[in-house]
Image (spheres, grey):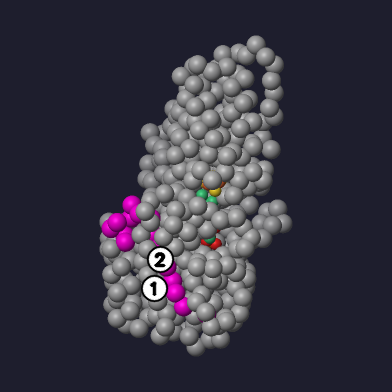
């Protein structure tokens, strides 16, 4: 990348010093070119904006990488009733903290993306759904919404509400989020129907991540061709990964933080050049790929290419939120796995038996394995349980269970020796296959 795009007003390495960060209020935002994309958008035909975003091949930044423009085309034509935008700022995935950077310092960038999206898709009500723990950020966003109203940023008839989450990981799953906004327990819905057709209060709804909406602004401002000069083509014939991406790195590195980089950067470059290397000069042992739901990369995958092909090229679930957590050679991977399993057990909403009961069973097995009270048979049982839960084996309503499945399976398979060293040999011969 030659210049910061999403972080142009937020000092980040290598372009600026994070010590200089401050909240960009309306006046400063406008002085630095803000809301010009909205003005340009309003001079365009709404359908042309949808086509532009489609042409940019912007992929959703919330985890699944679904093409943004294509999602917008799933909306039915306006029928005079309400149409919603649900802004997903739940960001409850452990190790993920990249949306927070935007709303901490440049909330108007997201509001501009919201105003453009509402105009392009003929949406009249936006709900900004923010993680419950983001109390300070909720204040920043509320102030920015007030400023936006004062300056007529939202078109007449368009409303924008801030909705604070009660605080649960499942609220980030798009249909759980819709239930939560409706004031109910965040139980994910069975799909189809998808939200674009039947979402909030039974009406057409677009659910987009905060970073996705922020990306719409520079695309409208500078065009799809410019957007496509950043990022990379697929190496396996899949759709490309264009544009810059916010990557939040945590764990055993010298300088953790959020970096804006081109999609396609290698994990090694991210760690060695941006994060100033491994902490204490230790060896790289592995990394959570992009939020714990995506699974873990092993010691031989330090050169993994961080693009939307990551799932297929490195045999994890996907790029996810592109926020890797780095482990050094001293990390106890059995303890890591037990800790992750505890998270999924606590966060299961309880609707689906494999997720509700399987996650508890897996956690109990992992506690026994860690304590040295399990046999090798329990290790195979653990893999069998993991592999039987999720949308992909077809046993659950939402992807939370797939996250548990991939996290546990990749950890056990990539660090099998550490698990085997903790269990007693079993009298009964068993054999559950490793990956896939
Ligand atoms: C358990 C679970 C939690 C999720 N949490 C978030 C989240 O915190 N933020 C987010 O943007 N997407 C989250 N997602 C993905 C959303 O369901 C949805 O795909 C996304 O908000 C769509 O926006 P995008 O197309 O702009 O990426 C989660 C998905 C699952 C299965
Ligand atoms: S998979 Fe788990 S979190 Fe998702 S709906 Fe089923 S029980 Fe709830």
- The residue beneath circle 2 is 128
**Residue 25 position within the rendered picture, expressed as x and y whole percent measured from the top left:** 29, 71
Using a 10 Å C-alpha cutoff, classify the residue at mark 2 as few (fewer than 14 neighbours), some (14 to 19) or many (20 or more): many
Question: Which residue is at the front of the view, 26 or 132?
Answer: 132
Compared with residue 311, is residue 430 higher up or lower down, i.e. above or below? above
Compared with residue 148, is residue 289 higher up or lower down, i.e. above or below? above
Q: Residue at x 60, y 18 (%)?
A: 376
Can residue 318 be seen here? The reply is no
Furthest-right residue in this view: 237
Q: Residue at x 46, y 78 (%)?
A: 124
Using a 10 Å C-alpha cutoff, classify the residue at mark 1 as few (fewer than 14 neighbours), some (14 to 19) or many (20 or more): many
**Residue 289 position within the rendered picture, expressed as x and y whole percent measured from the top left:** 53, 44
Magenta run includes residue 135: yes
Chain part drawn in magenta: 122-138
- The residue beneath circle 1 is 160
Secondary structure of the residue carrying tag 2 is: strand
Q: Residue at x 64, y 31 (%)?
A: 384
For residue 147, what is the image quadrant? bottom left
């Amino acid at each position: 990348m030659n210049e910061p795009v999403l972080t142009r007003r937020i000092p980040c390495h290598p372009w600026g010093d994070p010590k200089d960060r401050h909240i960009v209020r309306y006046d400063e935002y406008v002085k630095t070119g803000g809301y010009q994309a909205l003005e340009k958008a309003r001079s365009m035909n709404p359908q042309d904006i949808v086509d532009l975003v489609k042409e940019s091949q912007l992929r959703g930044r919330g985890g699944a990488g679904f093409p943004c423009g294509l999602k917008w085309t799933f909306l039915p034509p306006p029928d005079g009733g309400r149409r919603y935008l649900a802004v997903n700022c739940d960001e409850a995935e452990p190790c993920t903290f990249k949306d927070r950077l935007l709303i901490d310092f440049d909330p108007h960038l997201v509001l501009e993306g919201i105003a453009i999206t509402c105009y392009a898709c003929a949406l009249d009500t936006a709900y900004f759904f923010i993680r419950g723990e983001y109390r300070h950020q909720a204040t920043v966003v509320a102030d920015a919404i007030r400023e936006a109203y004062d300056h007529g940023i939202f078109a007449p008839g368009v409303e924008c509400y801030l909705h604070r989450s009660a605080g649960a990981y499942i609220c980030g799953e798009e249909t759980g989020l819709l239930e939560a906004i409706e004031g109910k327990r965040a139980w994910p819905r069975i799909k189809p129907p998808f939200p674009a057709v039947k979402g909030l209060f039974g009406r057409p709804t677009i659910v987009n991540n905060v970073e996705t909406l922020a990306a719409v602004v520079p695309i409208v401002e500078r065009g799809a061709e410019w957007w496509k000069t950043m990022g990379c083509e697929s190496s396996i014939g899949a759709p490309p990964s264009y544009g810059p991406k916010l990557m939040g790195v945590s764990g055993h590195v010298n300088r953790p933080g959020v970096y804006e980089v081109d999609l396609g950067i290698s994990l090694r470059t991210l760690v060695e050049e941006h994060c100033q290397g491994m902490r204490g000069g230790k060896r790289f042992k592995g990394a959570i790929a992009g939020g714990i739901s995506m699974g873990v990369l092993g010691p031989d995958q330090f050169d993994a290419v961080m693009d939307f092909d990551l799932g297929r090229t490195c045999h994890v679930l996907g790029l996810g939120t592109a926020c890797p957590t780095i482990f050094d050679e001293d990390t106890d991977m059995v303890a890591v796995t037990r800790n992750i399993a505890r998270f999924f057990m606590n966060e299961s909403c309880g609707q689906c038996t494999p997720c509700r009961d399987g996650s508890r069973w897996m956690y109990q097995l992992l506690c026994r394995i860690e304590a040295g009270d399990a046999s090798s048979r329990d290790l195979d049982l653990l893999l069998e349980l993991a592999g039987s839960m999720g949308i992909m084996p077809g046993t659950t309503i939402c992807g939370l269970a797939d996250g548990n499945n991939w996290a546990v399976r990749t950890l056990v398979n990539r660090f099998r020796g550490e698990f085997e060293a903790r269990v007693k040999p079993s009298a009964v011969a068993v054999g559950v296959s490793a990956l896939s």
